[in-house]
Image (cartoon, rainbow, N blue to C red):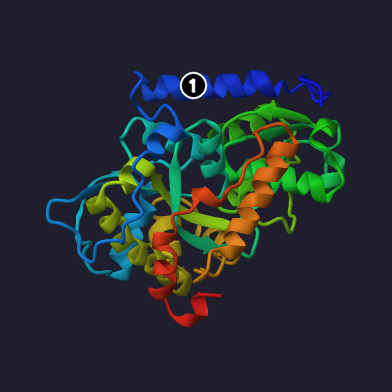
Amino acid sequence: MSSVPASGFDRRLFLTSLLGVTAAAAGLSGCAGSSAAADSEGASSAPLADRVPAGTSLKIASYLGTQQLQFKLARLPALPFTVSSWVNIGAGPDVINAFRAKSLDLANNAGIPPIQAHFQGYDAKVVAIGITRKPNYLFATSPGSDIRTVADFRGKKLAFSQGQAQGVVLLRALKQAGLKDDDVRLVPLTSNQFLTALQSGQVDIAPLANSQAPAYLKQYGPKGARTIATDVVDLLNLLWAPQSVLNDSAKAAAIAAYIPQWAKGQVWQYENPDVWNEEFYVKTQNLTPDQAKSISALANKPLFPPSWDEAIKWEQETADLLAQGGFVKKFDVSPLFDHRFEGIAAKAVPAEYRR
C-alpha cells in the first residue's frame, strides 16, 4: 500500500502528528512512560491483596459524571479507598495522554485505545471486560446528503478517529460492505469534533453514539440529515490502567475492589431505565423524556464474561484490521490483559449478566 493512499489520507503524517500531540500533552521529559518495555520492567504478577491498604487513592475517569451518578442512584457501598479525583474524560486519545501525565489511574473505554497505547509504546493493561452485543454507534450524514447505505460511502469524506471505538466501527462497517479504506476519504478527527464537522460539511459521514443521534436529528433532520444503522458491534467495554499503577500493590488492590462496583452500577442502570433517563439524560444532558427513552431502548444488557477468551479474540481481530490498513504494526494482543483480574466482574453480578 502506498504511503499516500487514494483516499488522500497520509497515515504516516497522521500518526506522526498524533504521537507528537500525545508527547506534548504528556509533557514527556524522558521519564514519563516513554516505552512499553521500560514500563513493563518489574511488572507485578503477585496475587492481588485481599484488602486495600489504608491511605490508598485512585484517580478514576468518569465521563460526564456517569460513574458517580450510577453509584449514588444504585446506593452501592462506599469504596474501600479514596477517589482523589473523578476525571471528566472519555475519549481514548485523551485517556492515553492522561495516563502518561500520571493524572489518571483507571479508565473505562472500548477495545481500541489499549491497542493504540501499545502502538505508541505505552504499557497499560485491561483489568475488566464487559461484552456489548448490540451496536452502540450509527452513522450520521451531513445535512442535505443523499447517502442512505454504507455502500454509498464510496468516495465520500468520513470522520475517522484511529484511537477510538468509532474508528474501528467505521473500518469494520467498510469491510462488511466490501469497501477498502482507500475507497473513501478518511478525515482524521477526534470524536468530539465529529458533530461540528458534520454540521459544517467538513465530512459527509461520521459515526455517532446512539445517545448523540436524537439531538443531532432533531436539529438537522429537517435539513436532510439522516442516520444509517448497521449491525457492526464494538464488542468491548473495558477498564484499563497503566502498568506502573498495576505494579503498585495497593493501587492494584483498590482497582480489584472497584471492579465489582463498576459492574453493579451498569446492571443497576440497565434495570432502572426510567430513573436513569430522568436523572442523567433529562437533568444533566437536557434531552427530552422521549429522546431519553429512544436511547435506553437501544441499551445493551450488561454482560461480564467469566472468561476473557472471546474478548482477546475480538481484540486480536481489531488489531489485525488496523494493521492491514497500515494504522499500526501487527502484534499479539495477549499481553494487553492482566489475568489477575479475570472473573472479578462476573462474580459481582447475577448469572444472567455473565453470558
Question: Looking at the image, which residue is at 38% across and 66% down?
Answer: 265
How far from the left and from the top, in percent, is residue 261?
33, 65
214 relative to 120 in the view: left or right: right
State whether residue 86 is above or below residue 200: below
187 relative to 88 in the view: left or right: right
Q: Which of 234 and 30 is in front in this view?
A: 30
The answer to whether any part of residue 146 appears in the image is no
Look at the image and tell me in which quarter the C terminus lies: bottom right
Look at the image and tell me in which quarter the N terminus lies: top right
Under mark 1, the amino acid is: Val
State whether residue 36 is above or below residue 234: above
Callout 1 secondary element:
helix
How far from the left and from the top, in percent, is residue 350?
44, 80
278 relative to 12 in the view: left or right: left
In the displayed image of the protein, which residue is found farthest to the left?
Answer: 54
254 relative to 216 in the view: left or right: left
Question: Looking at the image, which residue is at 57% across and 37% down?
Answer: 163
Q: Mark 1 points at which residue?
A: 21
Q: Nearer the viewer, residue 159 or 92?
A: 92
How far from the left and from the top, in percent, is residue 176?
81, 51
Q: Which of 190 and 53 is in front in this view?
A: 53
Sort mark 1 into few (<14), some (14-19) or many (20+) by Cα contacts within 10 Å.
some
Q: How many marks?
A: 1
| Quadrant in the picture for residue 300 | bottom right
How far from the left and from the top, in percent, is residue 334?
55, 52
The answer to whether any part of residue 165 appears in the image is yes
Question: Looking at the image, which residue is at 69% across and 39% down?
Answer: 322
State whether residue 327 is above or below residue 346: above
State whether residue 246 is above or below residue 278: above
